[in-house]
Image: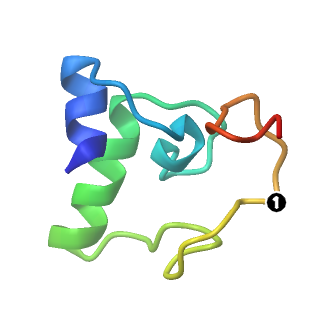
């Protein structure tokens, strides 16, 4: 999972906003824990736009994606 490599190894991702799984408007290790909890322990579902791919236009964010400035 790219989010794990991003959170723990600092690998680059083209869309940091996509790594904000818990919708706290930050991207850190808690997003990985949130996804693991959902996938393996029946935790809460990730917020909109899950389960489809798409932009989170419901909450403003400082996190960026390549191509946002186009």
In the rendering, at what x and y percent does residue 10 appear?
28, 18
Q: Please name the residue shown 26% across and 44% down the image.
A: 2
Q: Vertical placement of 35 versus 18: above or below?
A: below
Say which quadrant the C terminus sits in. top right
Q: Position of residue 62 (x, y in %)?
A: 75, 28
Q: Classify 10 Å Cα crowding around label 1: few (below 14), some (14-19), many (20 and above).
A: few
Give the residue number, with chain letter if any, for mark 1.
57
Name the secondary structure under disc 1: loop
- At horizontal 30% and vertical 68% (from top left) the residue drawn is 38
For this view, does 1 lie left or right of residue 6?
left
Q: Which is more toward the observer, 18 or 65?
A: 65
Q: Residue at x 45, y 74 (%)?
A: 45
Task: Name the spot of residue 47 as percent of width and height, x first.
Answer: 59, 68
On the picture, is 65 further left or further right than 39?
right
Whether 23 is drawn above or below 15: the answer is below
Is 49 on the left or on the right of 32, as rendered?
A: right
Q: Based on the displayed image, in which of its 4 quarters is residue 66 positioned?
A: top right
Residue 6, percent across and down? Answer: 30, 30
Does 56 sit left or right of 52 as displayed? right
Farthest front residue in view: 70
Q: Is residue 21 above or below residue 38?
A: above
Q: Which residue lies most toward the bottom here?
A: 51
Q: How is the image coloured?
A: rainbow
* Location of residue 57 with respect to 16 vertically, above or below: below
Numbered label tally = 1
């Amino acid at each position: 999972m790219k989010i794990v490599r991003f959170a723990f190894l600092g690998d680059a991702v083209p869309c940091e906003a996509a790594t904000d799984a818990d919708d706290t408007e930050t991207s850190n290790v808690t997003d990985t824990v949130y996804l693991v909890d959902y996938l393996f322990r029946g935790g809460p579902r990730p917020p909109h736009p899950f389960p489809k791919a798409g932009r989170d236009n419901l909450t403003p964010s400082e996190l960026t994606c390549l191509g946002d400035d186009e």
